[in-house]
Image (cartoon, helix red, strand yellow):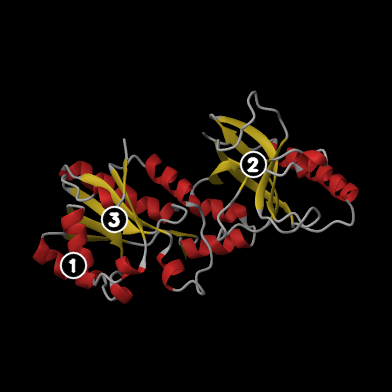
């Protein structure tokens, strides 16, 4: 069972093989590194460990240049736990942590994480102002007793798989391409929040969640699924601020196309799958026109979802 730790839970006593990264979205490139640390750990009798940051360091250090996140913390933690690692250490990134020099960071890995082997991508940069690189890590590693191994980039059709590319695809509603790089369907794990009943008033009740403000996903209407207790329910999903209703509050609203035995309620955790982008969010001249459009959205969603299969 994976142990989820924070800085206050350190140091770790067991020797580890570790990796470091943001792991936003946990795409196929990330999974290749994780595969390597698990294989190496099994071979050398070391515990497997991933050190990850939240929020993204760029969001803290240079928010103007930070574009968006692929998933929220809950989803990232879930994905990492599914990898059956021994440890996941989540560092709440702040400017104090940023000021660790390159050698201080390597010593932190060795002393606090008991990291004997570090496996990272070949372009890894670390430490204050990203002053450290792979050559430096290998040099210092020899003096502190930590072996450093690099992993080559993973490519599809000669394109390097990267979080940056996936962010752009999601922002442009290119879900199918994004999912190929992720190696899975795109989903978010969220907690249900209390809505204002507007959907019910117009005849289309919704289950509502409040997404992170920096989510990469393009706003609009999607065909998808809601998963609760390992049961899937077809749905039309709206991500946006409901311009016809009020235009001020941003929600992900899930209108179920089949009725579960027990409707998710406030504070329940649900998984929302986004399968296909149907249309952009728009302001309608009247509630009646909005209702007619939702009926069309439902019809199209049912056609899209008829042949979709998801492995839970």
Q: Name the residue under label 1.
A: 138
Q: Nearer the viewer, mark 1 or mark 3?
A: 3
Mark pair 2, 3: CA separation: 39 Å
Q: Is residue 123 something one can see in this rendering?
A: no
How packed mark 2 is, by other alpha carbons closer than 10 Å (few <14, some 14-19, many 20 or more), is few
Residue nearest the viewer, comparing 305 with 3: 3
The answer to whether 251 is drawn above or below residue 81 in the figure is below
Separation (CA) of disc 2 from disc 1: 52 Å
Dot 2 or dot 3, earlier in sequence: 3
Where's residue 176, x and y in %?
60, 52
Q: Where does residue 303 sit, x and y in percent of width and height?
A: 75, 39
Q: Which disc number belongs to residue 222?
A: none
Report which quarter residue 78 is drawn in: top left
Q: Which callout, 2 or 1, points at the residue further toward the start of the chain?
A: 1
Residue positioned 41% across, 46% down in the render: 77
What crowding class fits label 3: few (fewer than 14 Cα within 10 Å), some (14-19), or many (20 or more)? many
Q: Nearer the viewer, mark 2 or mark 3?
A: 2
Which residue sits at x=16%, y=59%?
A: 147
**Secondary structure found at label 1:** helix
On the picture, is 93 further left or further right than 278? left
Disc 1 residue crowd, few under 14, some 14–19, many 20+, Cα 10 Å: some
Q: Quadrant of the N terminus?
A: top left
Where does label 3 land, which residue?
Answer: 19
Q: Which of 116 and 39 is in front in this view?
A: 116
- State how far apart marks 1 and 3 are (Cα): 14 Å
């Amino acid at each position: 069972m994976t142990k989820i730790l924070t800085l206050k839970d350190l140091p770790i006593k067991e020797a580890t093989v570790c990796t470091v990264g943001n792991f936003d979205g946990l795409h196929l490139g990330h999974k290749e590194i994780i595969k390597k640390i698990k294989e190496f750990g099994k071979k050398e009798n070391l515990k497997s460990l991933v050190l990850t940051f939240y929020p993204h360091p760029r969001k803290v250090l240079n928010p103007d240049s930070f574009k968006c996140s692929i998933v929220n913390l809950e989803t990232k933690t879930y994905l990492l736990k599914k990898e059956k690692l021994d440890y996941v250490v989540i560092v709440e990134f702040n400017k104090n942590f940023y000021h660790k020099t390159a050698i201080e960071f390597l010593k932190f890995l060795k002393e606090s994480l008991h990291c004997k082997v570090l496996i990272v991508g070949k372009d890894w940069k670390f430490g204050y102002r990203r002053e450290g690189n792979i050559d430096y890590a290998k040099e210092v590693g020899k003096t502190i007793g930590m072996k450093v191994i690099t992993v080559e980039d993973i490519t599809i059709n000669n394109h390097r798989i990267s979080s940056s590319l996936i962010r752009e695809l999601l922002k442009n509603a290119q879900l199918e391409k994004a999912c190929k790089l992720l190696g899975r369907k795109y989903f978010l794990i969220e907690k249900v929040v209390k809505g204002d009943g507007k959907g019910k008033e117009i005849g289309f009740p919704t289950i509502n969640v409040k997404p992170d403000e920096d989510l990469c996903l393009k706003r609009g209407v999607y065909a998808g699924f809601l998963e609760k207790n390992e049961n899937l329910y077809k749905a039309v999903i709206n991500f946006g601020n409901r311009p016809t209703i009020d235009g001020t509050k941003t929600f992900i609203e899930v209108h179920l196309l089949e009725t579960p035995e027990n409707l998710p309620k406030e504070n329940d955790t649900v998984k929302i799958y986004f399968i296909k982008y149907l249309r952009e969010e728009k302001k309608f001249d009247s509630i009646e026109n909005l209702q007619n459009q939702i009926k069309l959205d439902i019809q199209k969603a049912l056609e899209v979802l008829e042949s979709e299969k998801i492995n839970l």
